[in-house]
Structures are given as C-alpha cells and as structure tokens.
C-alpha cells in the first residue's frame, strides 16, 4: 500500500504543458492531415519520362500517358505535366485514374471539390469542345459518383473546377479518381494536365484544409501546442532541400514542393499559412521551428553563409506576426486571408542540434538567437543541442531547451524523477519528443503497447510534478499512414477512412484533459517505484485530479489523505488498463480503451489500482 498525503501547497501548471509534435513523416501531412486526396497531383520534384513520375496515375483505355516537362509550364514552380495522347481513330472511352494516397475514401453525403489545369499544346485548327467525366470508382470500375466537366481545346492553360457528392459509403478504400472522355471526341489529340486535385469536406470547412477525422481525433486531446514543421523534415538532406517557408505560401500553382526527409515528396500544399490557420482553429498555439543551418547529410552552413538563413527566419516570423500594413511577408499572410497576426510565443532554433553541437555552439545558435531576439524580443527561443537536463553551455545562454528521448519501458519507469533532481536555475524544458520504442527485451514496436504506454504515464507524472520547469511535452511521432510508415511506433495510425487511437494516445489524452492549472505537492515517492501519482487541480471548477499510475503487472493499493473533505461521497474516475502486451491495431483498434468507474470519496480515499493502469480520480472539493 502507498500512503499519499497531499497538501494545498504547490505550483501552477503551465497551460502549454501537453501538446503535439508534428512533422511530415509516415505521410502525416501529405496523405494524412492534409486533405488532398490525389497523390502526385502536380508531378512535383519528379523526373519526366520515368515510371516514378507517374506514381499513383494509370491510363484508361488506349490513351498513352507520361509525365513531360511542359513546353509551356503552368508556372515556374510546376514545370511538369501529364501528357495525355489519344491515338487517331480511337472511339472507346479514354482517360486516366489516380489511386490516391494508398486509397480514396468514398463516404455518403460528402461533396468532393475537384479542379485541374489543362491545355492542348497543339490545338486542332477547328476547336474541339467536349466534356470530361470526373468520377470516383472502384478498381473494378463501379462508379460511385460522377459529374461532367466541359472543355475546349486551347494552347493556353485553363483551370476546370467541379464537385460531386457520394451517395454511398464504401468500406473499401481501393478506389480511384478518374477523368475520362469518349475516344472519338479527342482522337488524335495530345493534351496536358496538372495540379489535378480532389478534396473531401475539410475541418472547419477550410479551403485547402485538413482531414476532418484526424483533426477531431487530435481535438479530443485538447492539445495546447503544435510543434512544426519538424523534426528531421525541417532540415532537408541538404540546405537546398530544407523546409523553406516561402516555397509553402501563396497560390498552390506557385508551390514547387520538395523532396521530404522521410522518403517521399512533400507537395507543400500544406504550407505555413494552412498550418497556422488550422492551429488557430484547433485552439492550439504554434511552437514553430526555423531552419538553423544543419542538414541531414551532416553538413552545417558555414558561418559566413548564415545571413541567408537568418533573413529567412526573420521573414518566416514576420509572415506569422508582422504588421501587414508595413511588412511584405505579413502582407502575403493578409492576402491569403488573415490580416491580423497569428498567435506566436515560441520559436525552436533547429532540430536535434546535438548531432552538430560544435557549429551550433560556435555560431549557428548565437547568429539566429541574437538576430531573432533583437527583432522579436517578446518571443521565447528554444535550443535543441541538449540530450538531458544537464545542458551544454551555449552563448547567449538559452532559457528554453528541447529534450528528446526514445527508449524502453524500464527507462521511463526508472526515469520518473529525472526532472526532480534538476536544480531550479531558471531553465525551462520542453520534452519535445519521447516514446517507448522497444520492449525491455529490445524488440521493436510496430504499435504502442500498454506496458510502454503506462511507463510513459509514470514519466509524465514527473512532468506534472515538475511543471515549474517543464513547460511543454509531446509524444513523437504523432501520426502514421498504415500503408506508408517510416517510423514506428506512432501515437495515431490511420488509413484513408479509419483512425486508430493507440494505448499511448489515451495516456496523452488523459494527461491533457486532466492537466488542471495547479499541482499539489504530495508524499514524496522514488523513481522506479512501481506506482507513481500526481494531484492537480482545476481551480475554477474546484475539481481535483488524482492520477495513479501502476506500472506493475499486479494490482497496487494507494490510500490518499486529502487536506479537505470532499463535498460528495461518490467520485467518478477514468481508467486505462489492459493485459501486458495489449496493443490497439488496425485489426483490433479498441483492444484497450479508457472506461469510467465510480469510487467512494472521503477525507481518505482507498484506491486499488489494477496492474498496468493509469487512473484519474476526479474529486470535487
Ligand atoms: N529522428 C526522430 C527525431 C527527429 O526530431 C524526428 O524527426 C524523428 C522522429 O520524429
């Protein structure tokens, strides 16, 4: 039995404590949160004439399709186009299909919004007019919804737009988007297409917006912040491949995309503006990273080449918070629909610069910090070259540090007091990435499992308890597409039409929902104890959240002694618990989900915590 007495003494819990770490990894962005359904929609960053250039595209009927460098590109950012050549004498239906990001969801009632650019490089002497049919169909050709899109041959680019509404829901996602036309209409013609786009309804109805079910899944966590755009995906393989904000704003036709750092092309259709608008819609605040001159090939920008990136970072921040009436970058923001500045308090300078500590310490940190702090003194700047709370020396000395740790359950159980032992010297910590990535045996994890999730919960009691110096924490990575994953485990796994909440998702959710605003000191415990606890309070609601974490496989009893007598004798709690090894997976998505329970409340509360459990007992004063 663990006897826990808590007092009314303690400290504030920062509102920023629990949030989300994001980067476009595992198709978290393109094919995930970004709602565009067409993969390879503008043939960005591909080599014309290669089969890879045609990823996700296939011909219908006797048409010949290939990716070409257009003789008259739709924009300098999008030099490539799909060439669609119809042999003379063709009479049967021709066209092309796209298989989406490993599938396309067909959902009854959804009105899809589509568009494409098209032109006929060498139009016939007599203009040809006709109609394309745009549709969603199964791979066997069953059409679920369709509409006609009139066209007229012209050597100049036209943009066609259309909508259609699905009348059925298909459980299978192996569906195709198709553009087709009667062969006799276009026989002998060669046409070009690009930026072929199809959106479902989006979160908050935003144009060029976010996938609804994934947004709702994240909203259910009430996350306080969103760290973006990376993570490794900020850094590029080289400086030229980095995430550069300017290439991600403005009209989609002006965004070149880039080769991302996780093995696939980023369209950058999900760009800085879309991130910021969604973050605002989700009641979060950004923790925005700026490129700091280190890339994944291990090279650092030379000291006397830093100015380009310093200027880029200043412009990136001005896009977010500048005055649109005086600042050019802020004026772009305004022209995209947000005249007022977005909320911004935190800037992360680089990512995991403990891989390049020398150049970070010699000049990269100072160059960026000094310039940005001078320009934006009100912002907080987060350094990334620490691997633990014993931070390296940097000048100017950072106040904020981002720490990352990926390990096994034992690390998190034994590390539960890692922040208690740190001296309070003004430093503030962001546990920006953490997760149980292997079993104690070292076996890799494809999905989180209850043993690791409850170990994370034990570590997180340390975030509550030390939230005087831990201002933010987020599990990583956040998302993975079940059909294209480069890193496991992840908090949330998704397919084109399903979302699986892992056991670690529920731990993150419970800590975030029951964060409270004040931490109450209680009986000291020790690291590696099988049971951890945390008591926080929602002061305005007069509610106390008694969290109990039992990392042992057998039950343990905790007896709480309260500094007051609750106003009720029955309390309601929420528990996440499961047998060792349990995972939520695509085939068993609800193997472990939270459930509620009631308990007897009083000046003392005796709670028998099941093995491998996180429980939150809600007590009203
Ligand atoms: N290598 C990990 C650390 C880096 O910051 C992330 O991009 C990766 C997983 O999210």
Image (tube, rainbow, N blue to C red):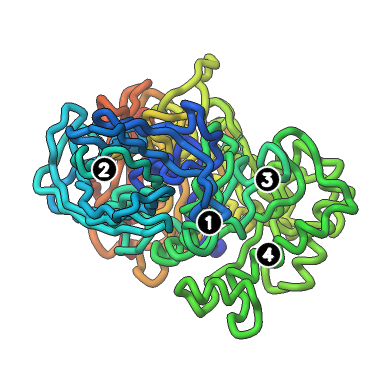
Mark 4 and mark 2: Cα distance apart in space: 59 Å
Q: Pointers 3 and 1 in contact (CB under 8 A)?
A: no
Q: Which comes sooner in the sequence, label 3 or label 1?
A: 1
Which residue position is annotated with label 3? 351
**From the image, which quarter does the C terminus lie in?**
bottom left
Give the residue at mark 1. Answer: 75
Q: Position of residue 301 (x, y in %)?
A: 82, 46
Q: Earlier in the sequence, mark 3 or mark 2?
A: 2
Q: Residue most toward the bottom?
A: 325
Instruction: Give the number of the mark in front: 2 or 1.
Output: 2
Where is residue 370? Give x, y as percent: 82, 64
Could you tell me how far apart the alpha carbons at marks 2 and 1 are, in whole angstroms? 25 Å
Q: Determine the quadrant in which ligand 1 lies.
A: top right
In front: label 3 or label 2: 2
Picture quadrant where residue 503 is located = top left
Circle 3 or circle 4, nearest the eye: 3
Q: Quadrant of residue 65?
A: top left
Callouts 4 and 2 close, C-beta under 8 Å: no
Per the image, the residue denoted by label 2 is 186
* Residue assigned mark 4: 380
Position of 294 with respect to 366 (left or right) is left
């Amino acid at each position: 039995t663990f006897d826990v007495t808590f007092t009314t003494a303690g400290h504030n819990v920062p509102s920023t404590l629990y949030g989300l770490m994001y980067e476009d990894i595992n198709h978290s962005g393109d094919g995930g949160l970004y709602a565009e359904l067409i993969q390879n929609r503008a043939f960005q960053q591909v080599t014309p004439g290669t089969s890879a250039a045609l990823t996700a595209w296939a011909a219908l009927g006797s048409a010949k399709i290939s990716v070409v460098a257009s003789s008259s590109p739709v924009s300098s950012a999008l030099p490539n186009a799909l060439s669609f050549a119809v042999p003379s004498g063709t009479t049967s239906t021709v066209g092309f299909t796209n298989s989406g990001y490993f599938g396309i969801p067909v959902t009854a009632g959804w009105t899809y919004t589509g568009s494409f650019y098209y032109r006929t490089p060498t139009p016939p002497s007599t203009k040809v007019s006709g109609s394309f049919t745009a549709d969603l169909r199964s791979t066997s050709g069953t059409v679920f919804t369709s509409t006609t899109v009139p066209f007229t041959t012209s050597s100049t680019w036209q943009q066609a737009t259309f909508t259609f509404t699905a009348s059925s829901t298909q459980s299978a996602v192996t569906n195709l988007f198709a553009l087709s036309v009667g062969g006799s209409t276009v026989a002998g013609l060669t046409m070009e297409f690009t930026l072929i786009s199809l959106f479902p309804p989006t979160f908050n109805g935003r144009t060029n917006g976010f996938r609804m079910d994934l947004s709702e899944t994240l909203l259910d966590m009430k996350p306080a912040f969103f760290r973006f755009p990376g993570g490794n995906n900020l850094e590029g393989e080289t400086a030229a491949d980095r995430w550069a904000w300017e290439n991600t704003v403005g009209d989609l036709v002006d965004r070149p995309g880039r080769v991302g750092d996780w093995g696939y092309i980023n369209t950058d259709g999900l760009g800085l503006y879309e991130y910021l608008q969604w973050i605002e819609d989700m009641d979060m605040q950004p923790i925005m990273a700026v490129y700091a001159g280190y890339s994944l090939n291990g090279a650092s920008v030379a000291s006397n080449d830093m100015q380009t990136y310093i200027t880029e970072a200043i412009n990136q921040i001005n896009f977010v918070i500048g005055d649109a009436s005086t600042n050019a970058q802020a004026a772009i923001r305004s022209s995209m629909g947000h005249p007022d500045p977005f909320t911004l308090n935190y800037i992360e300078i680089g990512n995991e610069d403990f891989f390049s500590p020398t150049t970070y310490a010699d000049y990269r940190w100072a160059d960026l910090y000094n310039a940005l702090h001078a320009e934006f003194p009100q912002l907080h700047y987060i350094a990334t070259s620490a691997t633990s709370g014993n931070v390296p020396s940097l000048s100017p000395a950072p106040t904020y540090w981002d720490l990352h740790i990926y390990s096994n359950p034992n690390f998190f159980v034994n590390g539960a007091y890692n922040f208690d032992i740190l001296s309070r010297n003004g430093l503030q910590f962001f546990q920006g990435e953490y997760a149980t990535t292997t079993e104690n045996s070292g076996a890799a994890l494809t999905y989180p499992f209850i043993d690791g999730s409850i170990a994370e919960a034990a570590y997180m009691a340390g975030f509550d308890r030390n939230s005087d110096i831990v201002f933010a924490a987020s599990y990583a990575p956040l998302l993975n597409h079940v059909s294209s994953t480069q890193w496991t485990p992840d908090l949330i796994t998704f397919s084109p039409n399903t979302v699986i909440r892992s056991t670690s998702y529920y731990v993150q959710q419970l800590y975030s929902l029951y964060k409270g605003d004040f931490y109450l000191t209680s009986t000291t415990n020790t690291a590696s104890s099988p049971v951890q606890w945390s008591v926080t309070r929602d002061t305005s609601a007069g509610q106390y959240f008694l969290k109990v974490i039992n990392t042992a496989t057998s039950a343990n009893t905790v007896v709480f002694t309260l500094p007051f007598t609750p106003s009720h004798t029955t309390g309601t709690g929420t528990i996440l618990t499961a047998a060792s090894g349990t995972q939520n997976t695509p085939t068993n998505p609800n193997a472990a989900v939270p459930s509620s329970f009631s308990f007897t409340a009083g000046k003392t509360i005796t709670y028998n915590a099941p093995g491998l459990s996180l429980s939150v007992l809600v007590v009203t004063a």
